[in-house]
Image: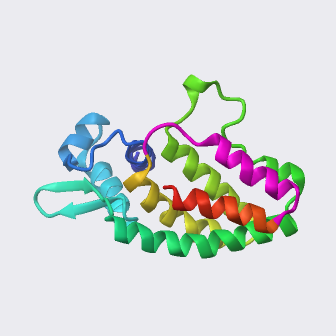
Amino acid sequence: LTEKIYVDLQRKIIEGEISPREFLTESRVAEEYSVSKAPAKQALHILSDQGYLISYPRRGYMVCTYTAPEVNEIQQIRRCLEGLCVRLAIERASDEEILSLRVYEGMAAHELDPRAAINTRFHTRLAELSGNPFMPETLRPLILKATMSYIKGEPDIEHFEKIVGAMLRRDVELALEYLYEDIRNI
C-alpha cells in the first residue's frame, strides 16, 4: 500500500496536481486512498526524505519548491553530469537505444504528459544510456528538483528531437549545445 500511495503522490507532485501551497496530512492521504494512517505516513515520510515534500511538525507536508538561484546551482551540476551522459551515450549506445529517448513517440497530442513528466523521462533515459548504473540514480533527484519548480505547459518535443538527431549523427558538440540549451531553458 505504501508503494502505491508513494508512486501516485510522486506523480501528482511532478505533474503539478498538488499545489506547493497545499498541506498534505496523514489523515487526508489515508482518507483519499482508503487506508490506515500508517501507509500514508510512510509514503509522506519517503517523499519528504527524497526532497519532494517539506515536513511541518503537527501541520503536515508541503511540496518543496526551489528559488531561482537554487535551481541555477542544480542546473550547473546537471550540465556537467548530463554532458558526460551525452558523451558516453554517443560512444556506447546503438542508434536504436538513442531513438528510445523519444519517450513521447506514438502518443497523440492530447495524451502527452505534462512537460515536467516528459522532461524527467527524457533526461532520466539519457542518464540510463550513459551505461553508468549510478548516473540515473544520481541525476533523477536533480532533474526532479528543477522540473518541479519551474517547468509548466506543453513539452518541447522539437528540442528533444534536435538532441536525438545530433546524437544519431554522433555529433558530440552539437548534441551538447542542444542539451545545454534545453537545461538552460527550464
Give the residue drawn at x 23%, y 36%. 31
**Residues in magenta, as a range:** 152-171
Nearer to us in this view, 65 or 136: 65
Left/right of residue 33 with respect to residue 28 in the rendered view:
right
In the rendered image, residue 98, in percent from the top left (x then y), is placed at: 80, 53
Q: Please tell me which residue is depicted at 76% across the width and 51% down the height of the picture.
A: 164
Say whether residue 56 is visible: yes
Q: Nearer the viewer, residue 143 or 171?
A: 171
Depth check, front residue: 140 or 110: 110
In-image side of 33 versus 37 (left or right): right
Q: Is the magenta region chiefly helix, strand or loop?
A: helix
In the picture, measured across the screen, residue 175 lies left or right of residue 120, that is right
Residue 166 belongs to magenta span = yes
User: Based on the displayed image, in which of its 4 quarters is residue 41 positioned?
Assistant: bottom left
Q: Is residue 133 visible?
A: no
Q: Position of residue 95 (x, y in %)?
A: 88, 52
Q: What kind of colouring is applied to the model shown? A: rainbow
Seen at 49% across and 66% down, the residue is 142
Residue 171: x and y in percent read: 84, 63
